[in-house]
Amino acid sequence: MSENYAIFKNGGKQYKVAQGDVLLLDKLGKEPKEKLEFDEVLALHNGKELSIGTPFLKGAKVQAEVINEGRGKKVIAFKKHRRKDSKTKRGFRRDFTRVRILSIAG
């Protein structure tokens, strides 16, 4: 089984992607159908060999297309200390940009 994939860095996180994958990135503020290009590629596998950058590969690019932007489900952080009349409730919704990987060039 020969799988082509790349590992790239965006927003302080690393993502392993193959062509056609859909993933959620931190909000980028882009319009739907807009094209993106990530050039901070850390590793590239073309089915036979693995290339690893130091820290990035020169000339390697991951091209993607923005599908939409949105907000994730609410995450509740609730803390309670027994018999101390102390509780804290916080909610958080992550803003994201959903993208589809179009091609991996290396």
Image (cartoon, helix red, strand yellow):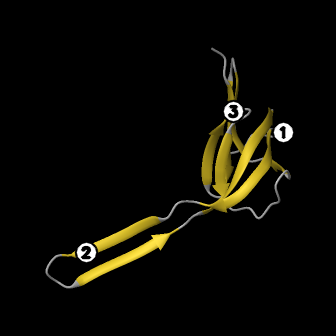
Visible in this render: residue 38? Answer: no
Badge 3 or badge 2: first in the primary sequence: 3
Q: Which mark, residue 18?
A: 3
Residue 11: x and y in percent read 66, 58
Q: Which mark, residue 59?
A: 1
Residue 29: x and y in percent read 77, 64
Q: Amino acid at mark 1?
A: Gly
Quadrant, the N terminus = top right
Badge 1 or badge 3: first in the primary sequence: 3
Q: Secondary structure at mark 3?
A: loop
Q: Residue at x 67, y 61 (%)?
A: 70
Q: Secondary structure at mark 1?
A: loop
Tell which of 60 and 34 is nearer to you.
34
Mark 2 or 1: the one toward you: 2
Residue 45: x and y in percent read 69, 27
Residue 10: x and y in percent read 68, 53
Q: Is residue 73 left or right of residue 34?
A: left
The relative height of residue 12 versus residue 103 in the rendered view (above or below) is below
Mark 1 or 3: the one toward you: 3
**Circle 2 Cα neighbour tier, 10 Å, few/some/many (<14 / 14–19 / ≥20):** few
The relative height of residue 76 versus residue 103 in the rendered view (above or below) is below
Q: Is residue 39 left or right of residue 89?
A: right
Q: Amino acid at mark 2?
A: Lys
Write down the quadrant of residue 47 in the picture.
top right
